[in-house]
Image (cartoon, rainbow, N blue to C red):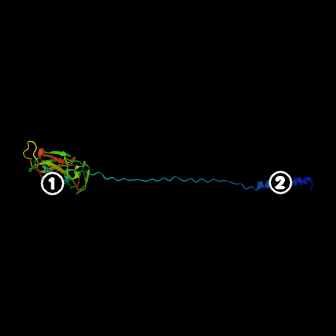
Amino acid sequence: MTAGSATFAIALALAIGFGGGWLFKKDTTTSTTTTTTAPTSTSSTTTTSTLPPALACGGAVLSGSVSTSQGAAGTIQMTFIVSNVGAKACTIDGYPTVQLLSPNTTAMTTTTVPAAAVFSPAAANAPPARQHVTAGGHVEFVLQFSDVPSGAERTCPLAASINVYPPSSATPFNVAASITPCNLGTVNVSPFFAAT
C-alpha cells in the first residue's frame, strides 16, 4: 500500500468511526409531569331552631291556694302555691302585688312590701328569677305579716281573701285566705320561685 493509500484509509476509518457514532447517537428526552390537585373545600351548615318565648303569666291563667301557714311571736307566714291553669306554658318573674279583700269583697287598705323580710324556705329569699311554668305546672310565693296592732290600731281588720296580681298583669287571681294584717294592711312578699 502506498503512502497515499494508507493516508486515505486512515481518514476513511476516522470518518466512519466518528460519523457512525454521530449517526447512531441516541437522543435523550427529559419530560416533566406536573400533577395539579384541586383544593378540597368542606362546608357545613348549622341550623338552630328556637321556639318562641313563652308569654308572661297573666292572672287569667293562674289560680292559687294556701299551701302552709305558720306563726310565731306575732309574725304570720303563709306559703301560696300558684298553678298555671292555661293551655300553654308561661313565664313569671318578680314579686306579686297583693290586694286584701273584706268578707264582702271590698278592697281594703293594703301595703305590699317586696323582699323586706326573712322567709322560709330559703328559695323565697333568693333574688327574682324567671320561672317557666308549664301548663298544669306550679310556682310558689310567701306572704308574711304581723297580727300585732301598731300605732293607733286596737284591732286589725279581717281579710277574707286576697287578689294576687302577677308582675306586669292588670288581671289578678283570687285566693281565699282569712288573714288579719296589721300596720295598715302591710304584707311582705317573696318573689315567685319554683315549687318545692
- The C terminus, quarter of image: bottom left
Give neighbour class at mark 1: few <14, some 14-19, many 20+ (Cα, 10 Å): few
Helix, strand or loop at mark 2: helix
Q: Is residue 156 shown left or right of residue 92? A: left
The residues tagged by marks 2 and 1 sit, at their Cα atoms, a distance apart of: 132 Å
Count of residue discs: 2
Q: Quadrant of residue 23?
A: bottom right
The residue lying toward the viewer, choosing from 78 and 117, is 117
Give neighbour class at mark 2: few <14, some 14-19, many 20+ (Cα, 10 Å): few
Q: Is residue 151 above or below residue 34?
A: above
Q: Is residue 57 shown left or right of residue 155? A: right
* Residue 98 image position (x, y, % from top left): 16, 48
The residue lying toward the viewer, choosing from 81 and 106, is 81
The residue lying toward the viewer, choosing from 130 and 76, is 76
Q: Is residue 4 visible to us here? A: yes
Mark 2: amino acid: Leu
Mark 1: amino acid: Ser
* Residue 66 image position (x, y, % from top left): 16, 54
Q: Which label sits in the foreground, 2 or 1?
A: 1
Q: Who's the residue at 89% across and 54% down the image?
A: 6
- The N terminus, quarter of image: bottom right
Question: Mark 2 sits on what residue?
Answer: 14
Q: Which mark is residue 69?
A: 1
| Residue closest to the far top | 152
